[in-house]
Image (tube, grey):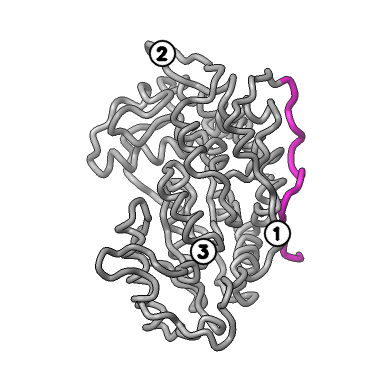
Amino acid sequence: MAPERPSGGSRNGPPRRRGRRAATLPTVLLLLASSGGGGGTGPPPRPPGEERGSPLPDLGELIDERDGSVVGDISFLLDFAVVGFPKSGTTFMKDYLNRTPGAYVYEREFCMKRDGDVARFVSEYHALHVSLNQTDLGEKTVMFGIKCPGPLYRANDLVFLRNYFPLTRLIVGLRHPVPWMASFYNYQAYKNVTLPPLSELAGRCQKGVKVCTDRARFHAALARLGKTPMEDEGEVALLFGTRYEAVDDGRRRASDEMPADARRHLSRTGRLPNRVLLYEIGQVHDRDASRHLSRSLEQYLGLSPGVLPEIEPFVQVKPRAVDICDDEYSEIRELLVNHAIDAAEWIREWFVLSPDVEVAAPKSFYRFLGDWDGDPCETESNN
């Protein structure tokens, strides 16, 4: 079977659902409308001046060693970033890409949330370029990356990406919101994080708590990249309008306006020029789909064909504080399935139409995304 190829904007997949209620178009979304951009798979472009014979600049040419402020072009230091969402395959992807000598991903999470993080990154990755003999920027044989789950929720991370790393290619993993919520909650509980009962985490996250159903609105987080026009009232309603779920005295309600925090976030980040590759976590666990996923990653990152090894099937067995398929969590699951349906529709009908966005192995990607129309717990019980 010929390998599937990464795809840019496409309307492949299940047809779009109709009958959305219209929403008033917020002015901020008009101001942040995406201007589109060039596209195409293949090796990431080189920054200006990064040609054969271009020597690695001294560290002092990149950051001020007195205060750590950026004083030079540091974009060449970061070729790709595994960003995605927590509990959506970021650790797997980091470990997998590290299995080829053509890629290097820092062993621990490396997020850039503040200026000091950027300075530390420059210092660390400049030293890595030297130690791995990548001092001729036009002849680099190693692609450098980081793993940082969750930056799509944070304005600072996206601003740093836009300002300092506009050519960095992003890899984003997706996971159905129901198992995502269960995995994230159980992971936090395993880490001895004090959490409210799962049934109380509908709507926006409570202060000091990272787990909530709003964080499963992956389409709203992806929209902060600015890859869609945001001019269609149906899209705006889907992202921030009539279907936005909030919590009021323990009861869910729909808000007719984009929430203020989302408005502030979008106004700070604007449109990012970075390319994006999407994959669905189910592709990792399916033997045939995983082969196509590997080839897509090679092409997207400009790695030699066949350099990535075969992905071996694996099953993770982790302690569970809760079983989200229990009847007591049926209301939470219903809300999460609604978010899943909305996210899948927005991804198919708006996000992948951007020339900056590709999906890994489209045939299997859309097959797994199609499963987002239902509750995985009901599928398991039927089996």
Q: Where's residue 305, x and y in %?
A: 65, 75
Name which residue type carries label 1. Answer: Gly
Q: Secondary structure at mark 2?
A: strand
Query: In the rendered view of the protein, which quadrant contains the C terminus?
Result: top right
Magenta run includes residue 185: no
- Residue beneath disc 3: 80
- Residue beneath disc 1: 39
Q: Secondary structure at mark 3?
A: strand
> Is residue 373 something one can see in this rendering?
yes
Please report the bounds of the magenta region as a residue range.
1-19
Name which residue type carries label 3. Answer: Phe
- Depth check, mark 1 against mark 3: the one in front is 1
Contact between marks 3 and 2 (CB within 8 A): the answer is no
Q: Is residue 172 left or right of residue 306?
A: left
Q: Secondary structure at mark 1?
A: loop
In the image, is residue 324 above or below residue 130? Answer: above
- Residue beneath disc 2: 248
Q: Residues within 10 Å of mark 2 (few under 14, many from 20)?
A: few
Question: Residue 3's image quarter?
Answer: bottom right
Q: Where's residue 208, x and y in %?
A: 28, 33
Q: How many marks?
A: 3
The dominant secondary structure in magenta is loop
Q: Residues within 10 Å of mark 3 (few under 14, many from 20)?
A: many
Name which residue type carries label 2. Answer: Asp
Query: In the rendered view of the protein, which quadrant contains the N terminus?
Result: bottom right
Q: Earlier in the sequence, mark 1 or mark 2?
A: 1
* Disc ID at residue 146: none
Q: How far apart are labels 1 and 3 at the CA level?
A: 16 Å
Q: Earlier in the sequence, mark 1 or mark 3?
A: 1
